[in-house]
Amino acid sequence: MTPEPDDGNVSRTQEAILAAYAELIEELGTDDVPFRLIARRAGVSERTIFRNYATRVDLLLATAAWIERTIFLRQGTTSIFDMPLTIRAAMESYDHRPELAHVVAETAMRGISGAAPSPRREVLAQMIDAEITTLGHDERRAIVAALAHLDSAATWVTLRREFGMSHGDIADAAAWAAEAVLNPIRSRVG
């Protein structure tokens, strides 16, 4: 049985497979890496890969989730108002590992079944609920959606591909946009 793509509980074998796949994606510049290369790099058989990930899509989803959890791990923050700095740091980390950022973004942007388009949405909602108790449902939902969108590899890819922005400009723009989302509610901290 294939684990859920966003399941943080992976076995050592799965960890080896996911890490090998991520390394090969970065080295070869494509997510269409042959399973035999993944198996060789992970030190397992191809059969072991298929036992853990029945299809390439399953492997891709699990790898994208693993990349988000391990390589693009966010610094812990307890205040929603620290998010502009967190988002800036995320944009910079995507720029250091662009092939992996593309994989994470593509799984979300293609709408592959099981991909989490905004894995941090729940964390953001919890931070807002803890700090700003006076927000109405619609306002809370809009702020969480905006911050979740800004705090994503998809935003980095869009700004890089569509606008040709440099890494510094991407980090500045994302942080500025997060500040613009948060500024109207700063005075309502409870």
Image (cartoon, rainbow, N blue to C red):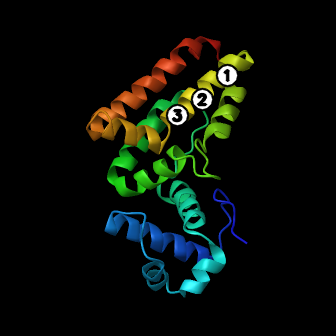
Residue at x-position 68% and y-position 39%: 122
Check residue 140 in the rendering and tell me which mark sits there, or answer none. Answer: 1
Check residue 62 in the rendering and tell me which mark sits there, or answer none. Answer: none
Choose between 144 and 155: the one closer to the eye. Answer: 155
Mark 1 nearby-residue class (10 Å; few <14, some 14–19, many ≥20):
some
Residue 187 place in picture, x, y as percent? 59, 11
Image quarter of the N terminus: bottom right
Q: Are marks 1 and 3 in contact (CB under 8 Å)?
A: no
Residue 145 to residue 180: above or below: below
- Residue 103 in sight in this render: yes
Judging from the image, what secondary structure is the residue with disc 3 in? helix
The residue singled out by tag 2 in the image is 145
In this rendering, would 162 be left or right of 118? left
Instruction: Give the spatial CA distance, label 3 vs label 2.
Output: 6 Å
Residue 34 place in picture, x, y as percent? 43, 76
In this rendering, would 163 be left or right of 93? left
Q: Nearer the viewer, mark 2 or mark 1?
A: 2
Residue at x-position 42% and y-position 51%: 101
Mark 3 nearby-residue class (10 Å; few <14, some 14–19, many ≥20):
some
Q: Are marks 3 and 2 in contact (CB under 8 Å)?
A: yes
Judging from the image, what secondary structure is the residue with disc 1 in? helix
Q: Tell me which amino acid carries mark 2.
A: Ala
